Image (tube, coloured by chain):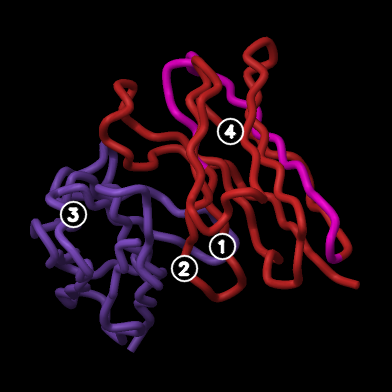
């Protein structure tokens, strides 16, 4: 079954870091880019960036430059997103998603994980 | 960053109605635009990509049009399962999403 399985909910204090994992199964992990998107309660989605699982190259949204790091481990077909310097405003559901185009040109998101709730609270 | 403005933010409609949602980009995104449906507690689901291409398995009552800066998502005959929130997503330059349109029962 083609799916992305994310790690469980996290509660962090302001200033801390969080690392979310996303395990891919049912398809060739290195063939499709992984994007990370977050959604605060009642808000539209917000893009954090993407990683190419084949070579590990990552590109981040300007807003998160310096605070986000995306990595992967091809041996266990898992992608990771680490966000540092957490504030209350980082409280959101964090999704890993896959683009539908194996050539990496068409960035529509055809497969989503169920989301990982990150709560930042003092 | 490219800004995506969706309208309306809420739409009240009845089963069988034709509904149209609009998304406007702050600059041209060519045809690099997708639409998603999201239900409470669930991840978004892809409906349309490249402005007008229907994702496999999505009912044909959904359709997308537009290019450049102005796009629409239409549902030809609203079904009970279609009451949800819809988002547009440009991926011409990085990615940005609209704030969503909630389609609710009239």
Q: Position of residue A25 (x, y in %)?
A: 58, 21
Task: Check disc 4: other Cα within 10 Å, few if <14, some if 14-19, many if 20+.
Answer: many
Chain drawn red, letter? A
Q: Is residue A1 above or below residue B38?
A: above
Task: Check disc 3: other Cα within 10 Å, few if <14, some if 14-19, many if 20+.
Answer: some
**What distance separates the C-alpha of mark 4 from that of mark 3?**
28 Å
Task: Check disc 1: other Cα within 10 Å, few if <14, some if 14-19, many if 20+.
Answer: some
- Residue A4 is marked as 4
| Secondary structure of residue under mark 2 | loop
Chain to which mark 2 belongs = A
Query: Is the C-beta separation of discs 1 and 2 under 8 Å?
Result: yes
Residue on which disc 1 sits: A39
Residue on which disc 3 sits: B29
Q: Nearer the viewer, mark 1 or mark 3?
A: 3
**What distance separates the C-alpha of mark 4 from that of mark 2?**
21 Å
Q: Residue at 35%, 61% (x, y): give it.
A: B1
Residue under disc 2 on the same chain as residue under disc 3: no
Check the rendered structure and report the hue given to chain B: purple
In which quadrant of the rendered image does the C terminus of chain B lie?
Answer: bottom left
Q: Residue at 62%, 35% (x, y): give it.
A: A70
Residue A120 sits in quarter: bottom right
């Amino acid at each position: 079954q083609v799916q992305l399985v994310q790690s469980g909910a996290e509660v962090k204090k302001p200033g801390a870091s969080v690392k979310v994992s996303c395990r891919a199964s049912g398809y060739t992990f290195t063939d499709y880019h992984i994007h990370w998107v977050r959604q605060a309660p009642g808000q539209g989605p917000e893009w954090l960036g993407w990683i190419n699982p084949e070579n590990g190259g990552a590109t981040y949204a300007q807003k998160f430059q310096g605070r986000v790091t995306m990595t992967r481990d091809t041996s266990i077909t898992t992608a990771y997103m680490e966000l540092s310097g957490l504030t209350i405003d980082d409280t959101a559901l964090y999704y890993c998603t896959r683009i539908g185009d194996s050539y990496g040109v068409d960035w529509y998101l055809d497969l989503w994980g169920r989301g990982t709730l990150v709560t930042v609270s003092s | 960053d490219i800004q995506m403005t969706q309208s309306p933010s809420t739409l009240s409609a009845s089963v069988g109605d034709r509904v149209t949602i609009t998304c406007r980009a702050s600059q041209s995104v060519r045809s690099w635009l997708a639409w998603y449906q999201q239900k409470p507690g669930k991840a978004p689901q892809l409906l349309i990509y490249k402005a007008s291409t229907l994702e496999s398995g999505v009912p044909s009552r959904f359709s997308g049009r537009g290019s450049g800066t102005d796009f629409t998502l239409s549902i030809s005959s609203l079904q009970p399962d279609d009451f949800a929130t819809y988002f547009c997503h440009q991926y011409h330059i990085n990615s940005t999403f609209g704030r969503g349109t909630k389609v609710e029962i009239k």
